[in-house]
Image: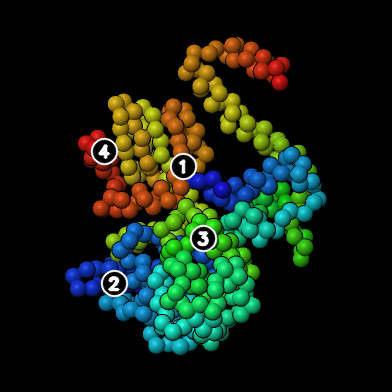
């Protein structure tokens, strides 16, 4: 786990990423907190906190006596939430750095187009 | 969550030396606690008092609701693995394990044998002939297989290589998951255990500096660097723990409530921001003589500049 950020948030994000990229399909079972703890070598209480965060926001749901499952519609919901964060996380620092180097927005847009074409 | 042990205003003085100075805290049931601090901070003394191997000068100690001294009810539920455990010279490894089986009601013989294999301990060997690392491994086997409701590990890894230490952490975590119990892990290797511990107790010069959940502490301390004016602006929202300057550039370590908003603020100020690891936090909090260097920003800066 990376330093300096609550581990339960990192666990929640890792699970979200797996849902976003389809590794964890909707209605499929999520690894148990004990499995998560052993795999990531973290305290099981911390792993449980990460899973519970996703239960609280509806991304996961609990089947009594069986475990945690991905809620139907979770992927679309996560995607729209992550899109909102995208601007703050990526576009803003991009603009800040560009301004520092004197790159005009028009030039920046052209750069993005060039890189997209060259992909 | 109930408390397994509580100490209240605990003080221990040796001739002229105050080892513990008015320490109060509780150990919560079924948690892994990290007991951190520098050499001589008072960690071992604290564990000795909790396990009835030392007397407090003043203050209250309660373990499982009772006073631990000569209290068989309490002591049979405690396992204390010391950094330098000594055994009677004639004992072999198998004898130590047999004795442990008699002492600890929850002893799991099958698990102990499995651990003996994992750590490749020679059962027939005299404990006097064990290497430093093997002696540590024997302590770890006893500490884990005793499954005591309250288990103390005081720097249990002396002489163990990185591979054996990782084996210890993995087995500790796996067995704790299956058989939850209260664990106190005293260690210098903070980076190695920071993801395992749920609660942090930090002692410095006999005083308790931190009594906090590890997750709450993560992200509370950050280091920002950039132009001095911007660093000054940022550090106003927290307590500055350390600062270094070079020309117009400064680097400051700050403690405060730093969520995503604080990251955005640092970015818009043109500052680089790095969250501190638990180890960094402990180093910062225990380096200065007066503990917190709160508000002493300029004094610390001068000290740094003079280096």
Q: Point out the tag, 1 or 4, that comes first from the N-terminus.
A: 1
Residue under numbered circle 4:
B304
Mark 4 or 2: in front is 4
Q: Please name the residue that numbered disc 2 is placed on.
A: B11
Element on which disc 2 rests? strand
The residue positioned 48% from the left and 87% from the top of the image is B73
CA distance for labels 1 and 4: 21 Å
Residue annotated with mark 3? B165
Q: Residues within 10 Å of mark 3 (few under 14, many from 20)?
A: some
Q: Are marks 3 and 4 on the same chain?
A: yes
- Horizontal and vertical percent for residue B276? 44, 44
Q: Which residue is mark 1?
A: B275
Comes first in the chain, label 3 or label 2: 2
Whether residue B90 is situated above or below residue B161 in the rendered picture: below
Task: Nearest to the eye among marks 3 and 2: give it.
Answer: 3
| Chain assignment, label 1 | B
How far is disc 1 from disc 3 in space, using C-alphas? Answer: 26 Å
């Amino acid at each position: 786990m990376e330093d300096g950020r609550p581990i339960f948030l990192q666990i929640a994000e890792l699970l979200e990423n797996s849902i976003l990229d389809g590794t964890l399909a909707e209605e499929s079972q999520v690894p148990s907190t004990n499995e998560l703890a052993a795999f990531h070598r973290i305290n099981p209480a911390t792993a449980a906190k990460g899973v519970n965060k996703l239960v609280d926001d509806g991304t996961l749901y609990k089947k009594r006596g069986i475990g945690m499952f991905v809620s139907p519609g979770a992927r679309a919901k996560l995607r729209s939430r992550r899109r909102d964060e995208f601007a703050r996380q990526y576009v803003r620092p991009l603009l800040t750095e560009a301004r520092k180097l004197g790159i005009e927005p028009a030039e920046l847009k052209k750069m993005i187009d060039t890189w997209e074409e060259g992909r | 969550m109930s408390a397994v042990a509580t100490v209240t205003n605990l003080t221990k003085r040796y001739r002229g030396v105050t080892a513990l100075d008015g320490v109060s805290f509780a150990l919560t049931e079924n948690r892994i606690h990290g007991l951190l601090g520098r050499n001589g901070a008072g960690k071992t003394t604290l564990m000795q008092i909790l396990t009835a191997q030392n007397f407090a000068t003043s203050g209250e100690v309660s373990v499982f609701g009772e006073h631990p001294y000569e209290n068989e009810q309490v002591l049979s539920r405690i396992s204390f693995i010391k950094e330098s455990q000594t055994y009677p010279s004639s004992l072999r490894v198998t004898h130590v394990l047999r004795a442990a089986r008699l002492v600890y009601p929850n002893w799991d013989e099958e698990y102990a044998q499995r651990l003996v294999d994992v750590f490749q301990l020679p059962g027939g060997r005299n404990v006097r002939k064990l290497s430093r690392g093997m002696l540590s491994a024997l302590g770890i086997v006893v500490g884990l297989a005793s499954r005591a409701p309250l288990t103390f590990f005081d720097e249990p890894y002396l002489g163990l290589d990185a591979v054996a230490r990782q084996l210890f952490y993995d087995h500790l975590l796996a067995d704790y998951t299956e058989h939850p119990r209260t664990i106190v892990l005293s260690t210098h290797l903070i980076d190695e255990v920071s993801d395992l511990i749920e609660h942090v107790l930090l002692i410095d010069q006999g005083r308790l500096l931190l009594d906090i959940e590890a997750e709450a502490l993560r992200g509370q301390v950050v280091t920002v660097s950039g132009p001095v004016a911007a660093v000054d602006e940022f550090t106003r929202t927290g307590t500055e723990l350390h600062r270094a300057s070079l020309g117009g550039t400064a680097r400051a370590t700050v403690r405060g409530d730093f969520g995503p908003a604080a990251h955005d603020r640092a970015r818009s100020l043109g500052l680089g921001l790095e969250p501190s690891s638990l180890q960094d936090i402990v180093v910062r909090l225990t380096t200065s003589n007066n503990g917190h260097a709160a508000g002493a920003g300029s004094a610390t800066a001068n000290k740094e500049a003079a280096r």
